[in-house]
């Protein structure tokens, strides 16, 4: 290879780093290495409550469905099988009271993190567009905006934006990290605000099936949108309710025209879910029993951990839904992370999720019963 070719390649790499990787924040969990080492040094080992990774086995009905099509050699469809889309519509109606959906308006995703990260780009947004993300939010909303090169603003109260229009508004209820549930009035105001400005609302509803106190509603619920799904998209994941994080199984649904646009782009770019995963999703969506069993496991773990965290002198804010406790004792979050690490417990600092989280930590419920019990004993 000539010197010119080598230098050209280096220039391209440098440009890529500046335009893509250079614009992205550091991966937050990389900064926990010191706290993780301290927690791992505990005589009884580490209890890792810093991530929301499922630990319980995948239900047999789902595994059987996965293997049932393992011999199929052909390409899967980007749109997903008709059986999958019909199962999604039926499950959303049965579990969450969402009505009026057309199966054609369901689009599988390679995990909802992928869908959220690429939505602004797939929708054709760019430098002239404003995207609103929650003030406390999972980092992927911000990453998606950075990948698309849009303007970003953190705002929960949309009146902060004044007359300025937004192309896209992300909503996350129940929230990661706080577990906060947005009420009916709040959701209706978001929908009304967006419609008055012809903005798109994307509601991340991955934790909708894990509500412990009160009621959580989908953006597509008729009491929220009056049965009109125009400019509304809901993102759903099977990672939490069905333990399918390793399967990368999720979907988006709502406005049929927007879903059709997303499908067209994804067809051209090869974004398709493997057929065995589609079959597994279909089985998971058709079976409520395994989901109910899993929900009760998390409820029991939450009861144990919530009592122990409060008993250790922490205030737990929100946390009425989802798989986390949003806890504080009024100190900087890294000091709290260190306090937990000394007891062999690893938690996530609230600053990962935005400037408003600097006094909180996020404590995951996604650990085995034995690990949750161990954490509770250490906190006592």
Image (cartoon, rainbow, N blue to C red):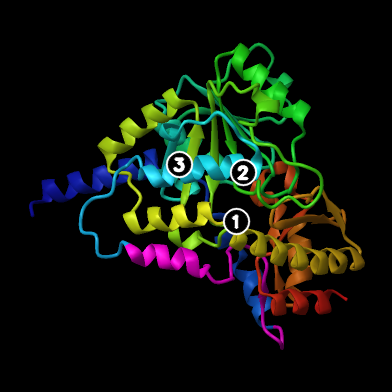
Q: Which residue sits furthest bottom?
A: 43
- Foreground residue, 128 or 61? 61
Q: Secondary structure at mark 2?
A: helix
**Gap between marks 2 and 3, in whole Å?**
12 Å
Asked whether disc 2 touches disc 1, contact meaning CB atoms under 8 Å apart, the reply is yes
Who comes first in sequence, dot 3 or dot 1? Answer: 3
On the image, numbered disc 3 is attached to which residue?
86
Q: Which residues are magenta?
A: 42-68
Who comes first in sequence, dot 2 or dot 1? Answer: 2
- 309 shown above or below 225: below
Q: Secondary structure at mark 3?
A: helix
On the image, numbered disc 1 is attached to which residue?
288
Would residue 308 appear left or right of 14 to someone viewing this image?
A: right
* Residue appearing at x 44%, y 35% in the figure: 103
* Residue appearing at x 75%, y 68% in the figure: 301
Would residue 88 appear left or right of 9 to someone viewing this image?
A: right
Q: Quadrant of residue 225?
A: top right
- Foreground residue, 377 or 285? 285
């Amino acid at each position: 290879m000539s010197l010119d070719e080598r230098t050209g390649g280096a220039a391209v790499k440098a440009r890529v780093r500046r335009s893509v990787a250079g614009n992205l924040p550091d991966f937050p969990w990389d900064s926990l290495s010191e706290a993780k080492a301290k927690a791992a040094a505990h005589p009884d080992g580490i209890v890792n409550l810093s991530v929301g990774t499922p630990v319980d086995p995948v239900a047999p009905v789902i595994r059987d469905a996965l293997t049932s099509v393992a011999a199929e050699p052909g390409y899967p469809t980007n749109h997903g099988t008709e059986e999958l889309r019909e199962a999604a519509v039926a499950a959303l109606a049965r579990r969450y009271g969402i009505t009026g959906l057309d199966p054609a308006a369901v689009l599988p995703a390679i995990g909802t993190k992928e869908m959220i990260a690429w939505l602004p780009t797939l929708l054709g947004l760019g430098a002239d567009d404003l995207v609103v993300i929650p003030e406390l939010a999972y980092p992927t909303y911000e990453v998606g905006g950075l990948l698309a090169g849009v303007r970003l603003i953190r705002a929960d109260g949309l009146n902060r934006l004044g007359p300025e229009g937004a192309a896209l508004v992300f909503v996350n209820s129940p929230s990661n990290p706080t577990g906060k549930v947005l009420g009916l009035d709040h959701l209706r105001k978001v929908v009304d605000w967006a419609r008055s400005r012809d903005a798109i609302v994307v509601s991340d509803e991955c934790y909708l099936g894990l509500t412990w106190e009160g009621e959580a509603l989908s953006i597509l619920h008729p009491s929220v949108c009056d049965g009109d799904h125009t400019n509304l998209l809901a993102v759903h994941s099977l990672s939490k309710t069905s333990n399918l994080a390793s399967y990368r199984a999720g979907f988006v649904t709502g406005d049929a025209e927007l879903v059709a646009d997303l499908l067209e782009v994804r067809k051209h770019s090869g974004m398709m879910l493997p057929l065995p995963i589609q079959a597994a999703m279909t089985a998971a969506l058709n079976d409520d029993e395994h989901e109910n069993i899993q929900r009760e496991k998390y409820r029991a773990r939450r009861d144990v951990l919530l009592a122990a965290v409060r008993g250790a002198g922490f205030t737990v804010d929100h946390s009425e839904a989802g798989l986390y406790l949003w806890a504080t004792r009024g100190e900087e979050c890294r000091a709290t992370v260190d306090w937990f690490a000394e007891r062999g417990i690893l938690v996530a600092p609230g600053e990962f999720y935005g400037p408003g989280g600097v006094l909180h930590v996020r404590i995951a419920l996604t650990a085995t019963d034995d690990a949750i019990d161990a954490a509770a004993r250490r906190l006592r």
